[in-house]
Image (cartoon, helix red, strand yellow):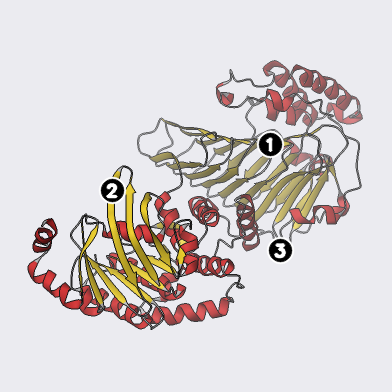
Amino acid sequence: MEALKDKLESSFLVLENELNGEAQSAVHALRREAFQRFLQMGFPSKRHEEWRYTNLKPILKPDYRIFPKEDTSVEFKDIKRFFLSDQDTYKLVFVDGVYSSWLSETTHQGFDVCTFSNMLHKYQDVSDEYFAKALPKDEALAAVNTAFAKEGAFIRIKKNITADKPVELLFVSTDHGHEIMTQPRNLVVVEENAEVTIIERHQSLSESAVLTNTATEIFALRSSRLNYYKIQNDNDTASLIDSTSIKQYRNSSVNLGTFSFGNKFVRNNLNFFLEEEHTESTLDGITIISEGQTVDHHTLVDHKVPNCYSDEMYKGIYDGNAKGIFNGKVMVHPHAQKTNAFQQNNNVLLTDKASIDTKPQLEIYADDVKCSHGCTIGQLDDEALFYMMSRGIPEKEGKALLLYAFANDALRNVKLPALRKRLNKQIANKLNVNLDFEL
Amino acid sequence: MLKITNLHANIGDKEILKGINLEVKPGEIHAIMGPNGSGKSTLSSVIAGREDYEITAGHIDFEGEDLSDLDADERAHKGIFLSFQYPVEIPGVTVTNFIKTAINETRKARGQEPMPANIMLKQMREKMGLLEIDSAFLSRSLNTGFSGGEKKRNEIFQMAMLDPKLAILDETDSGLDIDALRIVSNGVNKLKSEKNAIIVITHYQRLLDYIVPDFVHVLHQGRIVKSGDKSLAHELESKGYDWLKEEAAL
């Protein structure tokens, strides 16, 4: 951990030296400030309340290269499988942290689907207004990302516009024969009464360890509508730390889905800040993991103002010695009356070695609110399985159907047919069956 | 078709079946009656392959093959169907998806191709008509929030779709009003042929007015204590089970 910290420190100096004129910019001042914060905080250990159940040490141990050599050998055929099929989309593809224009399909027609670096250079007003304005200051990993924020997606849907196609973000890491760390940084601004659907994936094409420390800031302005889906299905040498913070303004509606099947390690820090009244937020998650995998969900829904609605549903299925963590914090401030906040976290453990630490954390300081939470940990229902088998459905397929039935509520906000189909297929794959779940 | 010889079965340390002998031939309808706790549901579960029971002696042969090493799904593939007394609610799995999966997994086990979707749909429509089931039913979650009558109709609908050789109807009449009883019985009678067989397990005689058995067996304390034709059912209805219990005690 200390080695990586030292390495980041020297890398940050390298970054500063390469900036030339930009070193005096407001953005860079924020980077420096963030890096100082990180140096003070250090990497979180198990002594931190928010990291009690997760040991980052082994994830931070490899000798990651911070600035991998540019690699242009990735062709569309290598990554085609990561995109939705039968669905036209805008695409932003980054290879080892570097934007690949020839693998991407961008636009500036009526709205912007382009890169974070492009935004920094061209739209100073945007960076002044939004950069580093949503992520909480006390998250060390997010601070590191801010310090190194150079590249990633910039999506801005302008007032009254509905994006004509979904946007797919794909971050690939390639094989350099050693470990690499990348730090993608995304900014999404959905302006007044605008609408867009975004799908984000991180995929390693490498056999060496990859650490992706990504951060995304989202601003859903008044009456905007955003669907944002994260597909976390990377290979078993890849680790992902994802810090995503969303600020919502009056009458906006945000659905965020996190679907985790792959990776050696995933930590999601997902924060919703409800800045103005009458917003709607849904947070859905399906986690299906097996031997050797850890997925840690930390969520916060911050009800700062009255009359907002939030609904959170996380389902988890753990096989082998898989380890799950769910920490769902809902904060209702004293004057946030008429808040509706719901949360549920349901888990199935398929073996004695699998584990889930689940911690609903509701802090309610207003008295006229509707809030509920529930968490369950269970096993498969033997009676239901016998019922299935008595109809000729073999045990493996019967279990898969039951598990799918258990989890699929959390697909409730996935309206895009191509994505639904893709997720159903991934769930079937993960449960090792060849079944079409949805009819 | 089905030959049960000296069948003993336990749940835990408790012996429930204490030497059952029963033979069912194609084209026959057998009724198994008996008081609560006599072992009726255990017998149906053991034939269908529920794992909670241990067979301690005797065997069950189906078309000349010993069933004891077969799992419940493999028995289903051979053509055995159990209509549950309490069908299980499975939220999130639609009736259509469940039946489609059951049929195609059965076909796969038999080395057949999956059934084409249009043929499956046509068959579903046909069988739904037989059981007076509304088409909206197909997209509902399996048994979830179904009334007692809907659950039993759904069981017979599945039986119609799977077309088993041997169907065991476990207390299919319980929880049914008289209209639902008529619809379900009509369905069963239409599915009956010279090639298949049915075992009706029931507490009461009233179902047997609709599904008329060739043989009636009375189960008591894990043994068949009396067998006869359909008149035995009437006799039980008027006299109750006590006289048989006394007879068995002698």
Q: Chain of mark 3?
A: A
Can you say which quadrant of the picture contains the C terminus of chain A?
A: bottom right
Query: Who's the residue at 89% across and 29% down the image?
Result: A19
Residue at mark 2 to residue at mark 3: CA–CA distance: 60 Å
Mark 1 belongs to which subunit?
A
x and y, in percent, of residue A364 in the image: 41, 32
Chain letter of disc 2? B
Q: Is residue B170 above or below residue B188?
A: above
Per the model, the C-alpha gap separating discs 1 and 2 is 49 Å
Crowd band around label 2 with a 10 angstrom C-alpha radius: few (<14), some (14–19), many (20+): some
In the rendered structure, find residue B15 and report the number of the disc placed on it: 2
Residue A38 left/right relative to A434: right
Name the disc covering residue A392, or none.
Answer: none
User: For mark 1, what is the residue?
Assistant: A264
Residue at the location (71% across, 58% down)?
Answer: A84
Q: Earlier in the sequence, mark 1 or mark 3?
A: 3
Closer to the camera: disc 1 or disc 2? 2
Badge nearest the viewer, 2 or 3: 2
Question: Any mark on residue A87, and which?
Answer: 3
Q: Quadrant of residue A296?
A: top right
